[in-house]
Image: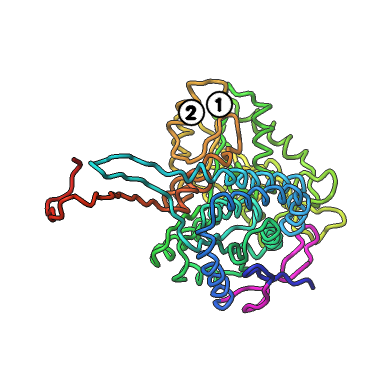
Amino acid sequence: MRTIDHWIGGAPAAGGIGYATVWQPATGHPQAQVALGGRAEVDLAVAAAAKAYDTWSETSLSRRTRVMFALRDLVERHEDELARLITAEHGKTVEDARGEVVRGREVIEFACGIPQLLKGGYSDQVSTGVDSYSLRAPLGVCVGITPFNFPVMVPMWMHPIAIACGNTFVLKPSERDPSPANLVAQLYADAGLPDGVFNVVHGDREAVDVLLDHPDVAAVSFVGSTPIASHVHRRASASGKRVQALGGAKNHAVVLPDANLVDAARQIAGAAYGSAGQRCMAVSVVVAVGSIADELVELLARQAAAIVVGPGDQAGSEMGPVVTAQARERVVAAVTGAREAGAEIVVDGRALRVDGHEDGFFVGPCLVDRVTPTMEAYQQEIFGPVLVVLRAESLDEAIAIINANPYGNGTALFTSGGAAARRFVRGVTVGMIGVNVPVPVPMAYHSFGGWKASLFGDVHAHGTEGVAFYTRGKVVTGRWPEPSEAARSALDFPTAS
């Protein structure tokens, strides 16, 4: 069986505390084993990054920018290869995977402008003969701990900006789909990045905890479930690190009576069932306002029932499998529990099987109506192709439902009324909002991040907030005295003169 090793100091590196199976979700069969790093592998990676930091942090902005431009071109040239690696280990369709690669590449493009982003400020003659200026300095060794659902895009929210800012990086990707991280490491090397600036350590919780505690790690970026995000934030903060930890989500789409219902149903179905619902920005809840609920549910059911489920690399497939057998079992249990709690299953994909792939981790689209906020299917992040429908009498009630939910990652409103949209945007306690846009993932020059239990820390990912996270400010106040100036000490607190 193929073995997937780490990438440390510019080359593949074997070793670890054991191996984990990498499955082929469409067949349900193992396809590779990935080395699980322990303390020794983490120490090697951090040491390589720390050594590289001494020279990389002093490398000119021009050279750093050239590396980013080269990486951007290489990622574009290898787009299909990256997409097919994602599909093979994650299960999403190749076209969906290509979209992920493109959105990740956009962050590299943003990082190509790092000289402008790192420009400081200068104030001349703040006092007689005294000038002051500010600059942004890199932190040191930065760590990214990333989830299975976007093995290329989410890490690219982190490492291009961190590296362009002058830091070095250790990536701990998900052990479920580890191969794309190694290909990205090779592309960095091909782009001219010095050895040790970007490293990959595969592993599970043991590797994560060693990274969180490591004295030579300056900052940690994390994306994953809320319980683990909370753990990462607490533990890394306790060891003095800068931390951004993005957690889970329960994203609501509110549909008002004046919305274009056909368009809303089409958009929401795509947002709910794309990538088999395994997106942190997937719409998993619809709040139907007023009298349109029955019609909206019927339109959503038609959309869900028409989705073609099959292997991600098969022509015509619109939705692939979920990532593991355990993920499929979780989805089935959530839908079963909703029915037992009194909800109505409108579209039931629990028993779906794909011809020729009977062992694959497939589950079909599920649409569950008449869900209430007290039901577990509403409260938990199912992370699968399950869309639940709540009913509300007014926009204010819908906003109250969203704000009472502990998550605050993304939300959307479908309406043709500007006043309602403005009230919604100002009223919801959510970090990313779409108006007639179901998946409001910001472009790379804006920042990605939620509120409440969807984010631990106060700085969002990529964009200008990403630059702020991976740097810290320095302010210099200087004077060059004339030889003839008086040498007597001044003991008063200095003020401008």
Front-most of residues 255 and 341: 255
Residue position marked by numbered label 2 in the rendering = 395
Describe residue 269's horizontal placement relative to residue 483 as left or right.
Answer: right
Q: Residues within 10 Å of mark 1 (few under 14, many from 20)?
A: many
Residue 147, given in percent of the width and then of the height, sits at 60, 57
Residue 312 position within the rendered picture, expressed as x and y whole percent measured from the top left = 78, 51
The region drawn magenta spans 13-38
- Residue furthest front as drawn: 484
Q: Amino acid at mark 1?
A: Leu
Category of crowding for the residue at label 2, using alpha-carbon neighbours closer than 10 angstroms: few (below 14), some (14–19), many (at least 20)? many
Say which quarter of the image contains residue 103.
top right
Residue shown at 41%/48% (left/top)?
A: 135
Can the viewer see residue 325? Answer: no
Residue 14 falls inside the magenta stretch? yes
Residue 218, placed above or below residue 444: below
Q: CB of mark 1 within 8 Å of CB of mark 2?
A: yes
User: Residue 440's x, y, as percent?
Assistant: 58, 37
Q: Horizontal placement of 97 versus 174: left or right?
A: right
Q: Amino acid at mark 2?
A: Leu
Considering depth in this image, is 79 or 251 the residue closer to the camera? 79
Q: Residue at x 57, y 42 (%)?
A: 444
Q: Which residue is mark 1?
A: 256
Between residue 325 and residue 281, name the one nearer to us: 281
> What element does badge 1 sit on?
loop
Cα distance in 3D space between marks 1 and 2: 7 Å
Of mark 1 and mark 2, the one earlier in the sequence is 1
The answer to whether residue 268 of the structure is visible from this angle is: yes
Q: Disc count in the image? A: 2
In this image, 175 relative to 493: left or right? right
Magenta residues: mostly which secondary structure? strand
Task: State the residue at coordinates (54%, 57%).
Answer: 59
